[in-house]
Image (cartoon, rainbow, N blue to C red):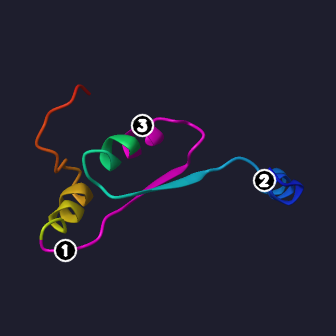
């Protein structure tokens, strides 16, 4: 890692916010795992609004999972 990048990381401190792109079978569980990490203050999920996947946005905003499979916890 270059000294410039190392210096920027040292100046800014620990990562407090993280974003996950795509709220599907990988993105939703990944976002949930990141949300359980105390280091992160905010976890953002990004999903494009389209005819086939835009419904996920409304479901997630209501606190519902658009995943059909059930998972423990």
Residue corresponding to mark 1: 50
The percent position of residue 7, horizontal first and vertical second, equals 87, 55
Relative image position of residue 57 (x, y in whole percent): 24, 64
Q: Provide the residue designation for mark 2.
A: 9
Q: Quadrant of residue 12?
A: bottom right
Local SS, label 3: helix
Q: Which residues are magenta?
A: 31-51
45 in relation to 28, above or below:
below
| Label number found at residue 20 | none
Q: Do tag 3 and tag 1 residues touch (Cβ < 8 Å)? A: no
Asked which secondary structure carries label 2, the reply is helix
Mark 2, residues whose alpha carbon is within 10 Å: few (<14), some, or many (≥20)? few
Residue drawn where x is 62% and y is 50% of the image: 16
The label on residue 33 is: 3
**Disc 2 from disc 3: Cα separation:** 23 Å
- Examine the structure image and report whether residue 14 is included in the region drawn in magenta: no
- The earlier-in-sequence mark between 3 and 1 is 3
């Amino acid at each position: 890692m270059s000294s410039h990048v190392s210096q920027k990381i040292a100046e800014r401190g620990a990562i407090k916010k993280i974003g996950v792109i795509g709220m599907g079978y990988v993105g939703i569980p990944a976002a949930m795992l990141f949300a359980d990490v105390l280091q992160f203050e905010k976890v953002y999920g990004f999903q494009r609004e389209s005819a086939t996947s835009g419904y996920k946005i409304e479901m997630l905003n209501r606190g519902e999972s658009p995943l059909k499979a059930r998972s423990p916890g």
